[in-house]
Structure formats: C-alpha cells, structure tokens
Image: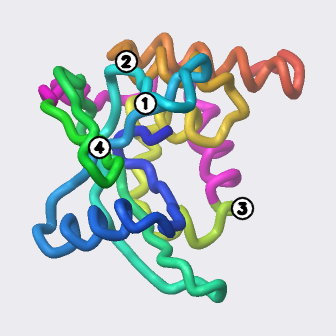
Amino acid sequence: MLFPDGPLPLRIFESRYIDMVSERMKSDEPFGILLMRADHDASQSSTYKVGTLAKITDFYQGSDGLLGITAKGGQRFRLISSERQKNGLNVGEIELIEAERSFALPSEFEFLPKMLANVLEEFGRLYEAQDNRYDDAVWVSYRFLEILPIDLRQKQTSLEDSDTIARLNLVVEQLDSVRGPASH
C-alpha cells in the first residue's frame, strides 16, 4: 500500500522489476503501485483499480546483495486497462485522480500531529527525509493510515475516497480501539 507523499521501501530481486526500476531511474518517471486483491487466483494478477504513482528517491545494495529502493508516493490514479508483458510485468493505461487540497486540521483532531510526530520519529530513517506537514489534514490522515494496523481493504477504501475527514475519523476510531477513548 502506498499513499500520496508516503515512503515505500522495496527489495527488488526479480529481473522484471530490476529492469523496470532501471528504466524508471533512467527516465526519472514514476511507476504505479496497486494493491493485490486477497481473493485473487495466484496464476493471474487481480488488483484494485485505484493506486498511487511512486517515484524512486533512493537506492542501495543490501548486505544480501539485493537491490533496495525507496519510493515516494505521488498522485493517485485509476487503472483503465492493463496487460501482462512477456516478462510478467503488468503495464497499464491510467487516469490521474485530482489531488486533494490541503487544509488545516479541524480543532477536534488537533491532538493528532504531536502523536504522529512521536510515532514517525520511532521509524527513523524511513521518515527523517520527509517533508513533514503536521498542519495539513490530508497529509496527517495519510501518514496515520500508513502506520496503523488497519485492514488492507479499509486502507484501500480510504485511498479511493477523497474524504479526509472520514479518514481522520477512522484514525481516531483505530487509536481509541488500541488505547481506549481519551479526552482529545
């Protein structure tokens, strides 16, 4: 799962993905990330139709010799059509989904930025290079959805929906279920 502006560390070992990463790095173009459906037949690719563009921001060779990359989420998109290439890589035609406009966190959610900052600090390197926008309700909602242990289908629904307040309410529900309702 990848949300706009979020980091995605990946270890690349299949030749089709090594080729794709090499091509994307040379062209400085993004690639698409779509969540696989849990009920899919392993012999066929079945994904959700809404995903996020990813741009490679860092690469390294791991101690195991595998290529590691970090990608950053860009704009959301809707898959129009796709096909599987001979090498097994899925490519498709997409349409971009308009980015949500940033807005200040409503007062009932003003406790979230400090909590988020403390949690992201624990993730260390993955989030240290982030352009943190703790005053942006859209950004805060996406960061929490990345890190909270929420069912992937629920995360996917939140990615497809452009309702930031609904995402923030989901975050509060999840936090309350873990720590119990508290005065915010």
User: Would residue 103 be counted in the magenta stretch?
Assistant: yes
Tell which tag, 2 or 1, sits nearer the viewer. 1
- Kind of residue at badge 1: Ser
Q: Quadrant of the C terminus?
A: top right
Task: Quickly name the residue at label 2.
Answer: 160
Is residue 140 depicted above or below 74 in this figure? above
> First in sequence: mark 2 or mark 3?
3
Task: Quickly name the residue at label 3.
Answer: 122
- Kind of residue at badge 3: Glu
Where is residue 94 shown, x and y percent of the image?
15, 30
Where is residue 51 shown, x and y percent of the image?
34, 31
Q: Nearer the viewer, residue 68 or 17?
A: 17
Is residue 56 depicted above or below 42 in this figure? below
Tell which tag, 1 or 4, sits nearer the viewer. 1
Q: Is residue 155 left or right of residue 115?
A: left
Task: Quickly name the residue at label 1.
Answer: 45
